[in-house]
Amino acid sequence: MTPLSVAAQEEDIQARIDSTLQLLARLDELAGQCLEAKDATASDTSPCAQFLAAVDGEIVATYLQQCTDLRAWRDAFVSAQFNSSAPPADSALQMQHLVGVEYVCGENALKQRTQYVALAFAHTQEAGPEGTTASTELNRRLAELEFDSRIDAERRALQDSVEALQRRRAMETARQMQQLENELIRQQITPPPQ
């Protein structure tokens, strides 16, 4: 994400969260239409084709890019707050943004924040040979989303581990410095042996 002023960045983050939520809603709408077409008649597969095109096309690609940008903002914000002793300017708004990012891009968000996508996906897998390629592509996309979520979780765990190690080292260094200062003070107080 490009550097912005704080107010512009706050507006941009909220706009990206809202946009990502709209992408999920649109994908869910297409999935619902696919399921309705399945119930109405087995001969009309165009709603399901539209759903699969959305999964393999711009909607999911944009969703993935938005989530990548939002996660990058979240990680940068968390790192900055961890390394800063000052409290955030508007912690309630920041918390709202963090919750929003987790809601739309968290682990399994695509499955948990949509009502029809998983069902429509299952339907397209049962559709037969013409749905096989699209189903394979959808499987691949869903696996990529899950993989990205796992990588994010592993990266966060690794960052937490590195930060904990840094804190321990800083505490050990401070303790050693304190011991050294105490020893120097003792040497100044204690008269030299005669």
Image (cartoon, helix red, strand yellow):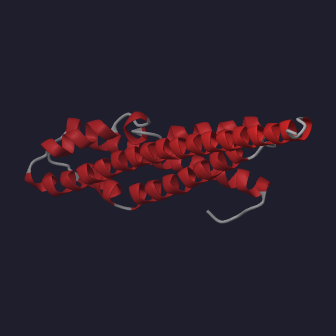
Residue lying at 35% horizontally and 56% vertically, measured from the top left: 54
Residue lying at 23% horizontally and 56% vertically, measured from the top left: 137
Residue 46 location (% of width, % of height): 25, 53
Residue 77 location (% of width, % of height): 66, 49
User: For the C terminus, which image quadrant?
Assistant: top right
On the question of residue 101 being in view, the answer is no
Which quadrant of the structure image shows residue 163?
Answer: top right
Which residue extends farthest bottom?
Answer: 2
Residue lying at 90% horizontally and 37% vertically, measured from the top left: 191
The vertical placement of 167 against 19, above or below, is above
User: For the N terminus, which image quadrant?
Assistant: bottom right
Q: Nearer the viewer, residue 33 or 175?
A: 175
Q: Nearer the viewer, residue 179 or 151?
A: 179
Q: Is residue 19 left or right of residue 58?
A: right
On the question of residue 20 being in view, the answer is yes
Residue 111 location (% of width, % of height): 37, 37
Which quadrant of the structure image shows residue 150?
Answer: top left
Residue 89 location (% of width, % of height): 81, 43
Residue lying at 64% horizontally and 45% vertically, measured from the top left: 78
